[in-house]
Amino acid sequence: AFEKKVWDWKAHSGGQIQGQLKRLGCSLDWPRERFTLDEGLSKAVHRVFVDLYKDGLIYQGYRIINWCPRCETALSDIETEYKDLDGNFWHIKYPITGTNDFIMIATTRPETMLGDSAVAANPDDERYANLIGKTVILPLMNREIPVIADDYVDREFGTGLVKITPAHDPNDFEVGKRHNLPEINVMDKNGNINENGGNYKGLDRFEARKRVVEDLEKAGLLVKIEKHEHSVGHCYRCQTIIEPYLSKQWFVKIKPLAEPAIKAVEEGKIRFVPQNWEKIYYEWMYNIKDWCISRQLWWGHRIPAFYCDDCSHITVSIDDPSSCEKCGSKNIRQDEDVLDTWFSSGLWPFSTLGWPDATPALKKYYPTSVLVTGFDIIFFWVARMIMLGIKFMGDVPFRDVYIHALVRDEQGHKMSKSKGNVIDPIIMMDKFGTDAFRFTLAMFAAQGRDIILSEKRIEGYRSFINKIWNTTKFILMNLGEEFTPEKIEPADLEPFDRWILHRLNDTIRGLTESLEAYRFNDAAYAIYDFWWHEFCDWYLELTKQRMYSKQDSLKKSSATARQVLFLILKKSLQLLHPFMPFITEEIWGTIKGKDEGLIIVSQWPAPMPEFNFPVEFEETALFKELLYKIRNIRGEMNIPPDRKANVVFKTSNKKITGMIQREIVHIQALAKVETVTVDAGYKPDRTDACAVIPEVEIYMPLKGLIDIEKEKERLGKEIARLTAELEKVDRKLGDEKFTSKAPEQIIEKEKGKREEYRDLLAKIEASLSKLS
RNA sequence: GGGCGAUUAGCUCAGCUGGGUCGAGUGCCUGCUCGACACGCAGGAGGUCACUGGUUCGAUUCCAGUAUCGCCCACCA
C-alpha cells in the first residue's frame, strides 16, 4: 500500500501511521521519495505558498507546540486529548540572592525548572512587591534569575509566585517575550534532558523529574508535596503525555485573509444553514490566530523552502531550485517539514478544477453551489477554503454551507474511534436494510439538532419498505397484462381521482420546497405520510369498488383508476428515491417504459397544473370526517364486523347531500354499513347512536344492540370536550381587551368557532337527554 | 471561566416567521384470517409543552432568570 500514490486526503492518516510504525519498532527513515503526490495539486500548493510568501503573509517564527516525544511529531489542538490526572504539586524554595531568605514556588513539572529564566509575581501583589527587580538563585543549576512582575500571575493560585520557563510552556513563552527572557530548551525531541540540563543530561523527562525532586529534598529545598488533580495533554495516537516544546515553524499571517472572509458571510455571499453557525464562524474568525502550517510528518506536501548552508538565505520557489537564489551556492537543503493538510485541502474548490490553469471546468463550476459538512470542521476546512478561495480566485468557493447533524451515542457524546462508542452503520444496515437506515437518518435530520439514533424508529421505518413493496404488488396485480400507461384526461377523472392527484401535486410542491430549504426531515415525512396515510389508507381502498366490479358501466372508470394508480406510483417512487435509493430503483426497473432510463437520472417530478382540484380536496376532507365518525361509533360501541349496521345522515345542505348520495358505495364499503340514507327530516329513535359535525348529524339505528351506558359515556366525553372548547372561546370573546385589540379576522374566526361549538353541543345534548 | 444548544406522550423525536383540539414512529388498550400488506387494518387512552417572571388582546412559540442535561472553546504554574 505504501507504494501507491498517496492522495492529499490521506495526509491526515500520515501521522497515525507514523506513530503506529514507531511503536512497532520500524525504522523512521522511510524514504519520502517513495510517496508521490498528485502533480497538479503539488503545483497549486507550491504556487499558493510562494504567492503568500511574496506578499509577506508567510513567515517563520517560534512557538510552543504540543509535542509527542514518542511519535516525534507536533500535535494540533484537536489531536491533543486532555485528561484529568492525579498529580503532585511540589512546593520548592528558591533562595533570594544575597540573603538567607527564600521564596516558595509550586509546580507540577519540577524538571522544567532546569530551564527557568525568571520567577514572576502579580504586580498588584503586596506580598512580593519588594522582591520585584531582585534576583533569586535557581536551585540545582545555581543560576541567578530575576523576579519580575506580570499580570498573567494569579495571586490566589498556589503561592502567588510562578517560575517562568519560556521554552516549555506556552504562557511562559508569552511572558518571556514580554520581558526579554532567554528561552532555554532543556529537552531534545525524544523528551530527554539535553546539555542545557546540567547534570541531568541524558535522563528521560520523568526520570529527571524524580531525580530533581530527590536532589531538592537532599538540599532541604523541598517544602511539601500536595496532591493536585490537573488536566494533562496526551497524544491521541499513542496516549503519551505531550510535552510543550519550543520550535521554529512556518506561519501564515491570517488577519489579512480573515477580513474579507468575514465580510463575505456578513454580506450574504455565503450562507450558513442553519444560520446560527454564522455566529460561531464569526466568533472564531474575529479571534483567529496566525496559522502554523508546519507539520513534522513524513508525508504531505513538503514546504518549498530551501536553506542555503553558505549564506543562510531561504529560497522559496514553485519548482525545486538547484542553487541558492542569492549566492548561487549548491549547498541548499529543503525544509524537513510538510504543510498542514488543511493548507492543501483549503484549495480543494479550485485546485480540483485545474487551478492555476484557467480550465473550462474552473470557469464553469467555480464558485460551487453548496458544501455539506459537519460543524467540527468549520474552522479547519470551511474557513480556510473561504479565505484561500477569496485570496486566489477573487470569489467565494461556495454559496451555501449546510452543516449537518452528528450521530451521537446514547449519552449524547460524539462518536469517536478512540472512545469506541461508534454505532456501526454497516451493522445497522445489515439489521434493518440500507434504505430503512438512510430514510431514518433523513427523518432525524431536523436542522440544528444532533441525532441520537433509536433502533425502534429504524424498525418502524423498515415497515414502510414493506408497505411500499405491497403497494406495488397490489397495483401491478390490478393493472393486468395488457396495461399501457396513457395520458390522463382530466374530464375522465372521478372525484377521488381528482383528490389524490391534487394531493400528489401538494406533495411534490412541499417536498421540493423542503429539499431546497435543506429541511430533509420535512421532505421525508411528506412522502411517508402521502404514501401511507393518503395513497394507501384512502385512495387504494377507494379504487377497489370500481376495479373489482363486474359491471360494464364501470369499465371506463376502472381503467381511469388504473391509470391514476400507475401515475401516483411512479411519481411517488421518484419523490422517495433520494431517501430510499435501492427499493425505488428496483421497483422502477419493473414498471418503467422501454425508453426510460434509471430512476436516478429521471426528471424530478413537477406539479401538474391540470390536476389541481381544490373542490374535490374539500369534499374529500368532509367525506373522511363522516367516515371517522361512523367508525368511531362502531369502534367505541364494539359493534362486531359481521353486524351490518345502517346509517342515516341528517342534513339540509344540498352539496353535502349530493356528495353523500354520489359516494354511497364507498361509504358502505369503508364504514361497513348496509344502507345509507340522507333524510333532512329524520326523527332519531331513542336507540340510535349519534355523532355530529357541522351541518350534518349522523345516526346509526342500533335497536337491541345499543349499550345505553356506553353510548352515554361516549356522548359525555364529546360534550366535555366541546364544553371546554366553548368555554375557551367564550372567555376570549367576553374579554373586552381581546375584542378591541385583536385583528378583525381572528375575532371573526373565534365567533365562527363559538357558533359551531354551540350548535354541535346542543345536538349532542339532545341525543343524550333522549337516552336518559 | 466563556460561548452555544436542549428540556413537548412511557421511550426516540417533529412543531418554519406568536392565534386550529401540539403531531410522528414505537410502546400500551379494544376489535379484526374483510380478495396488497399482521412489518397489516379500524378504533382508543396518554401531554400543566422543565420551572419562575416579563412582553402581548393572546405565549409551546418572543425576552429574562433558575434548574437539569449535552456540546464547543479557553485555563489549570
Image (spheres, coloured by chain):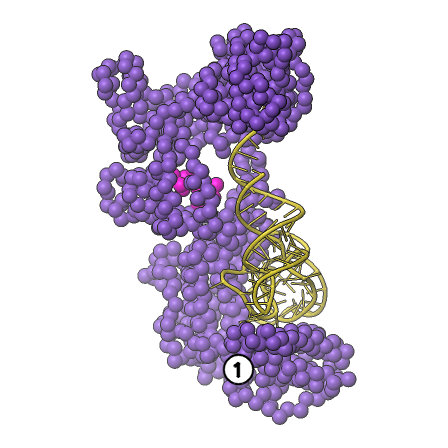
Chain colours: A purple, B yellow
Looking at the rendered structure, the number of numbered marks drawn on it comes to: 1
Front position in the image: A190 or A767: A190
Q: Quadrant of the N terminus of chain A?
A: top left
- For the residue marked with disc 1, what is the amino acid? Glu
Circle 1 sits on which residue? Answer: A663
Residue A299 visible in rendering: no
| Above or below for A72 versus A743 | above
| Above or below for A357 versus A751 | above
Magenta-drawn stretch contains A376: yes
Subunit ID for the residue under disc 1: A
Q: Quadrant of the C terminus of chain A?
A: bottom right
Q: Is residue A308 left or right of residue B31?
A: left
User: Measuring 39% from the left and 80% from the top, which residue is drawn there?
Assistant: A491
Q: In the rendered structure, which segment of residues is drawn in magenta?
A: A373-386
Q: Quadrant of residue A249?
A: top left
Q: Residues within 10 Å of mark 1 (few under 14, many from 20)?
A: some
